[in-house]
């Protein structure tokens, strides 16, 4: 038996991925950019074992066995990594130094998150990234991280960005087979250590509309989405890349908030509309704008962003974080009895 364990981090997009041009290969309708958060606080941990003695592929998620036969996306990741391993096995055989035919054995996968899955954080991104990375280590694949991201993408779109630390772009690509739809690192985690992220858990309820279903409904029904895909995001990709490389928090913060707002605007423009934000999410947005308005020199001090759920992620320079945590604690005291209010926020440094 051979077994390998690896972890993968969560990433939070600052230019959002929303919409697929191919739902099987998971090819997006626009490029996106994210920041990978520190693994110390949030990560998915996956152990994969393989043996000729195993009778079938099996999967345990947070200790509970799931029916893997229904998980097409996971199968795609198995198929792709096994195909590369098989090629290696065939080459080794031809060269006269055969290697173990691991590609023919079933696998047992055990995956868990070190944060509550119910908190509505990006668990599919870290989970699928951990799966693909662990498979690559198990099979000793010698492919680049971007090439591996092409496989993780087929598990969950946002997972391709979690294979890199730091600041990451998922280039949408143009090809029909998806071979150019890959993640690339814009800058490593050491590039901008002053930037921090604060995750505020507003609600731990499971989201009503899954991202997978929601984004296709937006594609079909939202006229605003055309403007976003064709004009807004292409310009923002360039501006955001520059802001990150220049460590320009002003541009980074404004683009981050505008892009989160437009993502939720296209959700509202979807018919019937999709609501991910709640009153607390909107109150936090307002608080951050009011906090920014108190700035002496007119410079932004913090930025919010929201994925497909009500939980806020606040990006800010380290020097402002203590003040922000105090403000949020003041206006939104933790109230464990009310689901509308905060659990204790995590403080997360990118990396
Ligand atoms: C709002 O990656 O979860 O978080 O590809 O269908 O698995 P699938 O969707 P998923 O969508 C994430 C959407 C988002 C924005 C983002 O992370 O870029």
Image (cartoon, helix red, strand yellow):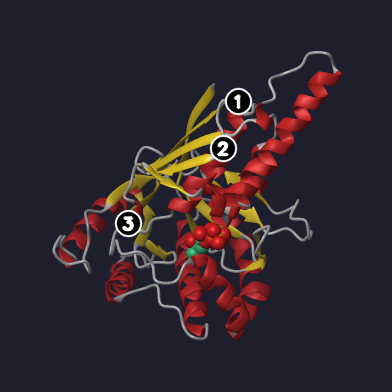
Circle number at residue 56: 2
On the question of residue 208 being in view, the answer is yes
Residue 306, horizontal then vertical, whole percent:
41, 65
Residue wearing tag 3: 119
From the image, state whether disc 2 or disc 3 is nearer to you. Answer: 2
Quadrant of residue 25 within the rendered picture = bottom right
Dot 3 alpha-carbon crowd within 10 angstroms: few under 14, some 14 to 19, many 20 or more:
some
Task: Check the image and report above or below for 345 versus 229.
Answer: above
Residue 325, horizontal then vertical, whole percent:
23, 55
Nearer-N-terminus badge (2/3): 2
Dot 2 alpha-carbon crowd within 10 angstroms: few under 14, some 14 to 19, many 20 or more:
few
Residue at (49% x, 85% y) in the render: 272
Task: Check the image and report above or below for 49 versus 182.
Answer: above
Gap in angstroms between the C-alphas marked 1 and 3: 38 Å
Location of the C terminus (image quadrant): top left
Q: Is mark 1 within 8 Å of ligand 1?
A: no
Location of the N terminus (image quadrant): top right
Task: Check the image and report above or below for 174 versus 159.
Answer: below
| Element on which disc 3 rests | helix
As rendered, which of 90 and 147 lies closer to the eye?
A: 90
Q: Is residue 193 left or right of residue 266?
A: left
Residue at (52% x, 48% y) in the render: 68
Gap in angstroms between the C-alphas marked 1 and 2: 10 Å
Q: Is mark 3 within 8 Å of ligand 1?
A: no
Residue at (35% x, 52% y) in the render: 117
Residue at (62% x, 62% y) in the render: 237
Residue wearing tag 1: 52
Nearer-N-terminus badge (1/3): 1
On the question of residue 168 being in view, the answer is no
As rendered, which of 33 and 340 lies closer to the eye?
A: 340
Dot 1 alpha-carbon crowd within 10 angstroms: few under 14, some 14 to 19, many 20 or more:
few
| Element on which disc 2 rests | loop
């Amino acid at each position: 038996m051979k077994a390998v364990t690896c972890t993968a981090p969560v990433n939070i997009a600052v230019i959002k991925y929303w919409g697929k041009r191919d739902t099987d290969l998971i090819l997006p309708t626009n490029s996106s950019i994210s920041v990978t958060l520190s693994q110390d606080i949030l990560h998915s941990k996956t152990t994969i074992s393989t043996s000729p003695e195993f009778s079938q592929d099996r999967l345990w998620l947070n200790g509970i066995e799931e029916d893997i036969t229904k998980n097409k996306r996971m199968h795609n990741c198995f198929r792709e990594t096994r195909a590369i391993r098989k090629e290696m096995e065939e080459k080794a055989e031809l060269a006269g130094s055969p290697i173990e035919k691991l590609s023919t054995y079933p696998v047992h996968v055990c995956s868990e998150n070190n944060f509550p899955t119910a908190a509505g954080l990006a668990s599919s991104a870290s989970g699928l990234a951990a799966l693909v990375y662990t498979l690559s280590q198990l099979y000793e694949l010698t492919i680049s991280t971007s090439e591996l991201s092409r496989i993780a993408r087929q598990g969950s779109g946002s997972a391709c960005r979690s294979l890199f630390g730091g600041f990451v772009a998922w280039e949408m690509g143009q090809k029909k087979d998806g071979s150019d739809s890959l993640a690339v690192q814009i800058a490593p985690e050491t590039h901008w250590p002053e930037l921090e992220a604060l995750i505020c858990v507003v609600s731990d309820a499971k989201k009503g509309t899954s991202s997978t279903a929601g984004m296709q409904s937006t594609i079909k029904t939202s006229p605003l989405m055309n403007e976003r895909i064709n004009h807004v995001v292409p310009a923002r990709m360039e501006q955001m890349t520059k802001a990150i490389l220049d460590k320009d928090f002003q541009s980074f913060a404004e683009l981050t908030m505008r892009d989160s707002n437009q993502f939720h605007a296209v959700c509202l423009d979807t018919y019937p509309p999709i609501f991910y934000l709640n009153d607390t999410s909107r109150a936090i947005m307002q608080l951050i704008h009011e906090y920014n308005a108190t700035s002496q020199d007119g410079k932004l001090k913090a930025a919010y962003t929201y994925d497909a759920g009500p939980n806020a992620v606040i990006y800010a320079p380290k020097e402002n974080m203590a003040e922000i945590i105090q403000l949020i604690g003041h206006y939104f005291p933790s109230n464990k009895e009310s689901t509308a209010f905060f659990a204790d926020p995590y403080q997360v440094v990118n990396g």
